Image: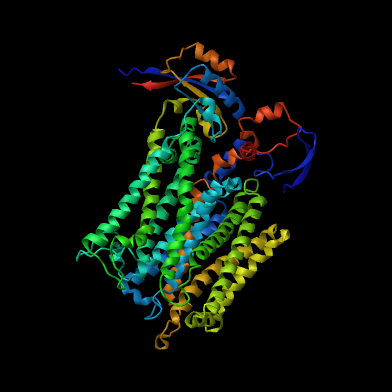
């Protein structure tokens, strides 16, 4: 009974070097594609511009995450030391003017909350973790984490067309052009 | 070994300028695939005999020392350690400060050298970060168990006890709890996130099976798309920017445990910077101690070059000299302030029954790294290993001198007492060395010990404009590696 229908994910093309990938990315950006990505074994600096991407918004998340940490630490220290149970050690007072004694903990919690925001913010922005992806079905894509440079244009891009996109990839120096299909039950 | 050579080049005005060409970070013109093969080969191939010869004794020492020592301590009572009424911080806090300090070089290499665009860090940062994680794990054992009834260690967490008494947030000891636990957490995140692309590399090389599933889970489905790299690099930068002040704060806070007291020999303002410099110093020595053998065992000579080792030796020389300055400055301030208790504490350190510890600290930490002024010494791996070992031992003695000599003689002569560690204490310390080595060897066995993605990035051809330079060579410009063009292009 089982019939397997395949859905097209998009085209995957290999490029021979980081330079070729960079130039290819500029052409695809200029052709107006949106749903596509360059794959490389290491981060290529300057590729963001060549792809027409904006700067990551992660720092904003982290700023607010860090501020939450500072506020949490202050609230914790102030409430427990001044409001609930003022501990007098070595006759040192506890009131709002003793706040410098709370700075080390405020600093540490700022960093701690920022660090967690980096981790979870990054995962959210990268849309990870996910344990499978249509591209993993490709016969050559495993080289993207070794020594391969690839561009994949997704079929859901409005500019995508079965022949036109293939020709575009070929014309900008893409080799081993492959139609990647995802299995869809 | 690549040599530094001078080129006479011409700029646009026709004036010939000599330009220093930097040494390559990866030797022998290795390809991307070679780098992947070699680094993944470390964990994919059978481990060499030497690995087993190191791992089995380390694991045994860890089991007997840490496992046995702590079991005995918990079942009998903290009295089995040599701590006494006067020296209540003995070996254990010495070991804690020692291990925490070891960890710092890992963060320094990852974060500070990243922010300052020191690209030579890429070959050593992964192992150094792993070292940080394992060192902090070893460190945590001691404060947790020296409190006596370890099952009450939750008293340190910010929750009230049965009498609704809260922790004292003005106490440096509580600052310590926050600082060290934050440090461990952030180091772990930094280490793990840095490893995700490399875990994906290993995942893609695995045959289908359990290994592929496990590496796949930890690789989070990483694909290496630029839309991922872009966020990823920002995250890495942010973590580096967060870790840099963090690493300085952690050892400063550790030093506050001492400096905020009024005890002669501890009550010094030089402690925070002095502790941080000492931590970096000891940590770099430990990086060399573990990386030089690893480089030899796995044949990583083209990735960890003599240039990397040379740079680390120079940092050891610099920080060792800073530490030496701090020792002398402490002494000078004791003399110049006219504080008799302070001066007396120093007289006791230098000429008292602990003179051998002081002498060991001075000669191993201050004198031994001075051989690195000579290029021949920085190029000889035997000399480097001997000095690194000297520094490891010397930095342990530094903490011992600070803690034990001070506590052995506080203000009242009636309290004076010498301290010697008990067998259980010694055993536990040796056990943590075994634990550290065993964990590190497991790391070599199961995880990529060199940052594959970043090492590839330092290759010349990784620059997206590399082909343009190849096709249209500009004779006025000396070809430089990708990582240097970034700096050149900003001017």
Residue B487 lies, in percent from the top left, at 62, 40
Q: Is residue B480 left or right of residue B194?
A: right
Residue lying furthest bottom: B414
Query: Which quarter of the picture shows residue B363?
Result: bottom right
For the C terminus of chain B, give its image quadrant. top right
Q: Is residue B31 left or right of residue B453?
A: right
Residue lying furthest front: A97
What is the number of callouts on the image? 0
Residue B377 lies, in percent from the top left, at 70, 61
Q: Is residue B15 left or right of residue B42?
A: right
Query: Which quarter of the picture shows residue B267?
Result: bottom left
Establish if A182 lies above or below B419: above
Residue lying furthest top: A163
Query: Which quarter of the picture shows residue B385?
Result: bottom right
Residue found 73% across the figure and 35% down from its top: B477
Establish if B342 lies above or below B307: below
Residue B116 lies, in percent from the top left, at 57, 47
B407, B35: nearer the viewer: B407
Residue A14 lies, in percent from the top left, at 56, 24
B177, B122: nearer the viewer: B177
A95, B430: nearer the viewer: A95
Establish if B435 lies above or below B234: below
């Amino acid at each position: 009974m089982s019939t397997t229908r395949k859905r097209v994910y998009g085209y995957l093309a290999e490029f021979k070097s980081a330079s070729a990938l960079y130039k290819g990315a500029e052409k695809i950006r200029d052709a107006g594609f949106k749903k596509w990505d360059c794959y490389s074994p290491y981060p290529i600096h300057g590729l963001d511009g060549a792809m027409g991407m904006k700067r990551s918004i992660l720092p904003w998340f982290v700023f607010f995450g860090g501020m939450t940490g500072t506020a949490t630490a202050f609230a914790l220290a102030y409430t427990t030391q001044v409001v609930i149970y003022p501990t007098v050690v070595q006759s040192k007072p506890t009131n709002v003017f003793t706040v410098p004694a709370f700075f080390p903990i405020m600093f540490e919690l700022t960093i701690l909350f920022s660090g967690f925001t980096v981790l979870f913010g990054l995962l959210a922005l990268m849309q990870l973790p996910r344990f499978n992806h249509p591209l993993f079905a490709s016969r050559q894509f495993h080289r993207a984490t070794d020594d391969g440079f690839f561009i994949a244009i997704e079929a859901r891009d409005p500019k995508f067309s079965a022949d036109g996109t293939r020709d575009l990839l070929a014309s900008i120096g893409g080799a081993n052009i492959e139609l990647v299909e995802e299995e869809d039950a | 070994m690549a040599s530094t050579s001078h080129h006479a080049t011409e700029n646009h005005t026709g004036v010939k300028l000599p330009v220093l060409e930097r040494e390559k970070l990866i030797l022998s013109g290795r390809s991307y695939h070679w780098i992947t093969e070699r680094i993944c080969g470390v964990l994919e191939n059978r481990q060499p005999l030497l690995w087993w010869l190191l791992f089995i004794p380390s694991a045994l020492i860890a089991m007997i020392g840490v496992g046995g020592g702590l079991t005995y301590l918990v079942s009998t009572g903290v009295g089995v350690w040599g701590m006494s009424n006067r020296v209540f911080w003995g070996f254990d806090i010495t070991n804690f400060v020692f291990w925490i300090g070891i960890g710092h070089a890992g963060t320094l290499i990852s974060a500070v050298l990243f922010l300052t665009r020191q690209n030579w860090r890429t070959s050593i940062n992964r192992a150094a970060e792993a070292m940080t994680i394992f060192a902090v794990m070893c460190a945590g054992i001691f404060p947790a168990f020296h409190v006596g009834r370890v099952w009450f260690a939750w008293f340190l967490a910010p929750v009230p006890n049965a009498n609704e008494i809260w922790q004292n947030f003005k106490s440096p000891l509580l600052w310590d709890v926050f600082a060290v636990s934050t440090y461990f957490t952030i180091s772990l995140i930094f280490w793990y996130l840095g490893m995700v692309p490399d875990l994906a590399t290993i995942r893609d090389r695995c045959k289908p099976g359990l290994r592929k599933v496990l590496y796949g889970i930890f690789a989070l489905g990483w694909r290496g798309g630029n839309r991922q790299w872009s966020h990823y690099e920002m995250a890495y930068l942010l973590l580096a920017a967060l870790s840099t002040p963090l690493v300085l704060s952690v050892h400063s806070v550790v030093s506050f445990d001492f400096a905020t007291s009024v005890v002669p020999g501890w009550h010094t303002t030089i402690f925070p910077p002095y502790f941080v410099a000492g931590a970096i110093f000891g940590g770099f020595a430990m990086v060399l101690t573990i990386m030089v053998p690893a480089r030899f065992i796995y044949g990583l000579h083209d990735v960890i070059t003599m240039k990397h080792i040379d740079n680390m030796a120079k940092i050891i020389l610099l920080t060792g000299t800073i530490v030496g300055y701090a020792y002398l400055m402490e002494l000078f301030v004791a003399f110049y302030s006219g504080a008799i208790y302070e001066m007396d504490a120093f007289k006791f350190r230098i000429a008292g029954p602990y003179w051998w510890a002081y002498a060991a600290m001075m000669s191993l930490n201050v004198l031994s790294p001075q051989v690195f002024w000579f290029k021949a010494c920085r190029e000889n791996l035997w000399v480097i290993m001997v000095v690194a070992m000297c520094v490891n031992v010397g930095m342990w003695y530094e903490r011992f001198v600070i803690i034990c000599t001070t506590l052995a003689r506080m203000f009242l002569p009636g309290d004076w007492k010498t301290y010697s560690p008990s067998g259980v204490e010694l055993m536990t310390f040796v056990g943590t060395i075994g634990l550290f080595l065993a964990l590190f060897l497991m790391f070599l066995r199961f995880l990529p010990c060199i940052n594959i993605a970043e090492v590839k990035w330092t290759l010349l051809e990784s620059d997206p404009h590399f082909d343009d330079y190849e096709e249209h060579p500009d004779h006025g410009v000396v070809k430089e590696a990708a990582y240097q063009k970034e700096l050149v292009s900003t001017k």
